[in-house]
């Protein structure tokens, strides 16, 4: 093990208590995606934190979404061919404020419970301590960027996709991205994820009295129903699926309905299938079969698929080597159904590893927990990987 790595590990061991303190602080600033101000408070807290590390920072604010926080080191001696490294995460959680009671951070045995403790305040702590350890050993090999989004749990719908674009901007030109999303029980590393998007379709028809002159009307609900059956039969599990999960329309049984709106959850294994799905839906909207109706569609949240791209295998090997060095189990590269910001990096050709965060379970439920003893080891794995790049 090289000297720098030994020093970084010693620094992390000495500061293990600080990791737990920071976790408590971040969990206590509850920040559901819908609470813009709460996430602003989190970003301000992290801004102070990264300022103390001598990092440049920018908080990108949005009207309806929590901000995206970005910070980066400014090494003086880095050679230009050494491309930057990106650390990724998110600040928002799915839990409404107060759901876990007045004191939302509860330690019970070797577990800690709280809103977002696993998904992914624990991962945010790891990202910050990786930065601190590298800072402590005077790391200047590459620039390190940190990007934490504020509306990840709603597929960036609240920032109208802008947060995803920011991830892409910061990822551009990087050597690799590491996402500190909630970690697997056995340290598994996510190398592939499905993509997902929410499409909202609005059908407009013409209202008329259902008894007196139904022929004067054009039923938006009938048009929507025809479309939904066409859409759902196109689903092929594991490849491309459509779920019409929400619908509303009409005003009463005696009125031909002049409006109907439905939302479709799309899932796709590769980005080509997303394009295919959008083209199909657009075509369907342009060719209504109920005369007198018309359709519009809009996107309401979007994640690309995280594909296994060139360089991802090498990155995984490097990470596995770090695990071996630490005497930890060698993690497998796995595929997951859920989406993450890693996909914005892989979409533009930047290899990424995901799920490098704290270990735990029951994400998105009131039983959400994390295993704080995994903070130290997950930090070490990533520090060792970055030092050997
Ligand atoms: Zn997450």
Image (cartoon, rainbow, N blue to C red):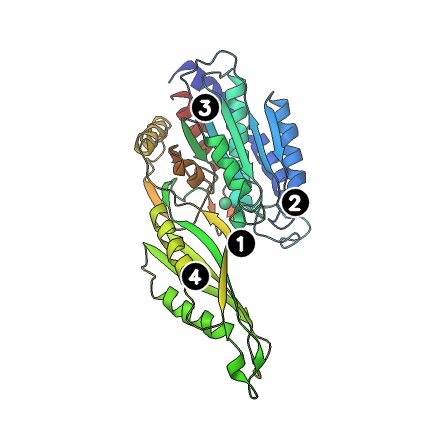
Q: Which residue is mark 3?
A: 84
Q: Is residue 9 visible?
A: yes
Mark-to-mark CA distance, 1 and 2: 32 Å
In the displayed structure, 104 sits above or below 84; it is below
* 140, above or below 129, in the image: above
The residue identified by callout 2 is 63
Q: Earlier in the sequence, mark 4 or mark 3?
A: 3
Is the CB of the residue bearing disc 2 within 8 angstroms of ligand 1?
no
Give the class, few, some or many, for how many residues have Cα within 10 Å of label 4's Cα (few <14, many ≥20): few
Report which quarter residue 2 is drawn in: top left
Cα separation between marks 2 and 3? 30 Å
Nearer the camera: disc 2 or disc 3: 2
Mark closer to the chain start, 2 or 3 = 2
Ligand 1 lies under 8 Å from the Cβ of mark 1: no
Residue ID for mark 4: 286
**Which quarter shows the C terminus?**
top left
- Cα separation between marks 4 and 3: 45 Å
């Amino acid at each position: 093990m090289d000297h720098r790595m030994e020093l970084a590990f010693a620094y992390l061991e000495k500061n293990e208590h600080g990791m737990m303190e920071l976790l408590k602080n971040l969990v206590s600033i509850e920040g559901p995606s819908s609470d813009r101000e709460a996430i602003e408070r989190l970003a301000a807290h992290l801004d102070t934190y990264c300022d103390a590390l001598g990092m440049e920072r920018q908080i990108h604010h949005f009207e309806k979404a929590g901000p995206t926080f970005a910070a980066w080191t400014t090494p003086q001696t880095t050679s230009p061919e050494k491309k930057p490294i990106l650390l990724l995460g998110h600040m928002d959680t799915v839990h409404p404020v107060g759901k876990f009671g007045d004191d939302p951070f509860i330690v019970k045995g070797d577990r800690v419970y709280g809103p977002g403790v696993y998904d992914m305040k624990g991962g945010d702590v790891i990202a910050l301590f990786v930065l601190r350890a590298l800072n402590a050993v005077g790391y200047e090999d590459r620039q390190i960027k940190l990007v934490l989004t504020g509306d990840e749990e709603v597929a960036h719908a609240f920032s109208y996709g802008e947060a995803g674009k920011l991830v892409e901007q910061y990822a551009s030109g990087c050597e690799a991205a590491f996402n500190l999303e909630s970690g697997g029980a056995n340290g598994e590393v996510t190398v592939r994820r499905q993509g997902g998007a929410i499409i909202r379709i609005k059908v407009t028809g013409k209202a008329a009295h259902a008894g007196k002159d139904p022929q004067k009307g054009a039923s938006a609900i009938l048009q929507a129903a025809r479309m939904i059956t066409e859409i759902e039969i196109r689903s092929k599990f594991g490849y491309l699926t459509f779920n019409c999960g929400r619908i509303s329309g009409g005003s009463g049984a005696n009125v031909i309905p002049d409006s109907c709106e439905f939302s479709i959850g799309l899932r796709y294994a590769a980005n080509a299938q997303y394009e295919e799905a959008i083209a199909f839906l657009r075509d369907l909207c342009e060719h209504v079969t109920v005369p007198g109706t018309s359709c519009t569609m809009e996107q309401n949240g979007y994640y690309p698929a995280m594909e296994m791209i060139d360089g991802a295998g090498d990155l995984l090997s490097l990470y596995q080597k770090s695990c071996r060095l630490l005497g930890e189990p060698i993690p497998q590269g796995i595929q997951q159904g859920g989406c993450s910001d890693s996909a914005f990096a892989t979409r533009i050709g930047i290899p990424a590893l995901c799920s490098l965060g704290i270990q735990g379970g029951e994400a998105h439920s009131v039983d959400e927990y994390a295993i704080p003893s995994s903070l130290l080891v997950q930090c070490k794995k990533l520090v060792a990987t970055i030092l050997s790049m």
